[in-house]
Amino acid sequence: MNTAYAFRFTQHLITVMVLLIWGPTKASDRAVHVTGTVANIQSWEIRGYYTAMVVAHTEPRRYGVVSTRPQLMVDRQTGQFEGDLVCEVLRNKHGRWVDIHLINMAPTFQGYSTMIIRVPYTRTIDLGTFNWKPSHYRWKEGVLVIDSAVPRDTLIGDLFGDHVRISPINPEPGDSMRFEFVWNNSGQPHMARFGDLYLQDESSGVCDFTFAVRTDTDVFTESWPHHVVLHLQAKVKGRYRLRQVAAQGEHLRDVDFMLNNDLYFTVNERSEP
């Protein structure tokens, strides 16, 4: 009886020790002091569209939901910001990291645009002077580099006009790439489709798409934004080229997203920069 009790006690003790050892390796929240300067705060791309830039650890709050995390405001004149954030510390084989989000917001446009910077965790983080760009970056040896380890979006065209948002632009084999097309028209029917993916010169995959609206239908005098989503399956590794070709047929007008401007992307395993 004593032997069985001792065995169960030993098992319990080992379990507690494992939990104590494993527990601290999980992600945890830490307060960090963040400073930096957005060099292009006066540029038209920012001042012309947005009324505020927020520095935070998480995405902007949803409407009707009050954020419980501290946020910082970027000075609209100088581009400077300084203050404390509560960040989740992420751990991997390369060390401990925190993600700093710089979010541009406008009262008349809900599609917030975000720049994310992954920085080695310290109590005090100085990002120095940098240009705001809506993508994922990593702080490496004192400079910002594109973070190729995470799925990234890209936008082609005018954010407040005709454009296409691609998610992700750095797909892995088997990923479904999401293409969200946004354009302004007065209610005309549209035609949008991807063609079959084929090889060219035995080295790169090519995919053609068409996007057009009908010109033989009654329309309103005013126009407003419309959007449609298409998906493209990223198959084997390699180089791909996406191009928009003119629609064939009468009474069709092409919506210019990428006419005469091919997009190249690579399907590969994502890795740390």
Image (cartoon, rainbow, N blue to C red):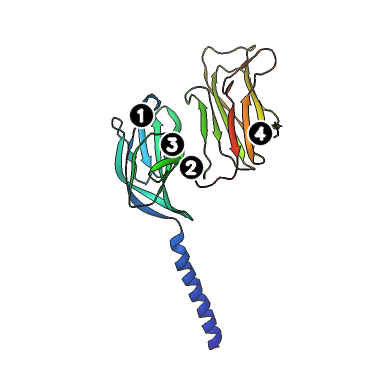
Residue 51, numbered label:
1
Give whichever of discs 2 and 3 has the lower sequence position. 3
Q: Secondary structure at mark 2?
A: loop
Left-right relation of 106 to 192: left
Which residue in the protein does label 2 denote? 147
Give whichever of discs 1 and 2 has the lower sequence position. 1
Give whichever of discs 1 and 4 has the lower sequence position. 1
Query: Pointers 2 and 3 in contact (CB under 8 A)?
Result: no
Q: Position of residue 44 (x, y in %)?
A: 38, 24
* Mark toward the viewer: 2 or 4: 4
Q: Position of residue 203 (x, y in %)?
A: 67, 35
Query: Pointers 1 and 4 in contact (CB under 8 A)?
Result: no
Instruction: Name which quarter of the figure residue 35 lies in.
Output: top left
* Mark toward the viewer: 3 or 1: 3
Q: How far is mark 1 from mark 2, CA to CA?
A: 27 Å
Instruction: Name which quarter of the figure residue 218 lies in.
Output: top right
Res 65 seen here: no
Give whichever of discs 2 and 4 has the lower sequence position. 2
Left-right relation of 252 to 88: right
Q: How far is mark 1 from mark 4, CA to CA?
A: 43 Å
Residue 114, numbered label:
3
